[in-house]
Image (spheres, rainbow, N blue to C red):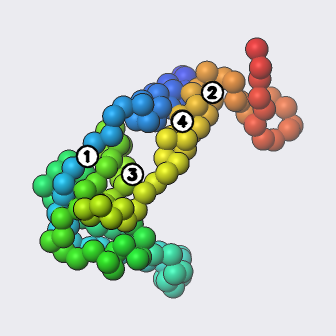
């Protein structure tokens, strides 16, 4: 029963990823409300140097976008930007200010299609783990 429910979830998430790439993108004029950054710490409390930078936005559906350090420092609170995002998962695809494109995620459709197809293939059984044998890994079943 758990395996069936897990496969249903994989199938639904895979369909959502593929649908997200096929739907028209959302274009909004938003303002930057605030900046936040978060540095990862290991289990001993030491900072590992992996910092994520986020812009929090107002006046639209998309509430935040993860950006790189250069864009994080370039934009100030209150700046108006154009954000293009996906409809379902609200991923920021492109951030621009006027004619200046500041961040552009070129391959987001390919990544979404590939991961969606892999999730659906796993859900219907084309990709399956060989639990019955002593072998480990993923086998591909054709037919």
| Label 3 secondary element | strand
Instruction: Tell whether 121 sits left or right of 69.
Output: right
Label 2 to label 3, Cα distance in Å? 26 Å
* Tags 2 and 1 touching, CB below 8 Å: no
Residue 113: mark? 4
Res 125 quadrant in image = top right
Observer able to see residue 65: no
Is label 4 in contact with label 1 (beta carbons under 8 Å)? Answer: no
Chain-order first, disc 3 or disc 1: 1
x 41%, y 76%: residue? 69
Comparing 41 with 81, the one in front is 81
Distance (Cα) linking label 2 and label 1: 32 Å
Q: Is residue 113 left or right of residue 58?
A: right
In the image, which is nearer the foreground, mark 2 or mark 3? 3
Tell me the mark number nearer the camera, choosing from 2 and 1: 1
Crowding at dot 2, Cα within 10 Å, few <14 / some 14-19 / many 20+, comes out as some
Q: Which residue is mark 1?
A: 27
């Amino acid at each position: 029963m758990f395996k069936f429910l897990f496969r249903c979830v994989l199938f639904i998430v895979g369909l959502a990823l593929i649908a997200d790439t096929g739907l028209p993108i959302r274009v909004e004029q938003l303002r930057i409300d605030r900046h936040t950054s978060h540095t990862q710490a290991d289990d001993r409390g030491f900072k590992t140097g992996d910092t994520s930078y986020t812009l929090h936005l107002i006046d639209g559906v998309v509430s935040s976008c993860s950006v790189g350090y250069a864009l994080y420092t370039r934009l100030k609170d209150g700046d108006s930007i154009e954000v293009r995002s996906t409809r379902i998962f609200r991923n920021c695809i492109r951030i621009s200010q006027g004619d200046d494109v500041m961040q552009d995620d070129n391959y987001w459709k390919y990544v979404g299609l590939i991961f969606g197809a892999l999730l659906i293939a796993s859900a219907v059984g084309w990709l399956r783990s060989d639990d019955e044998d002593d072998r480990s890994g993923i086998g591909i079943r054709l037919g």
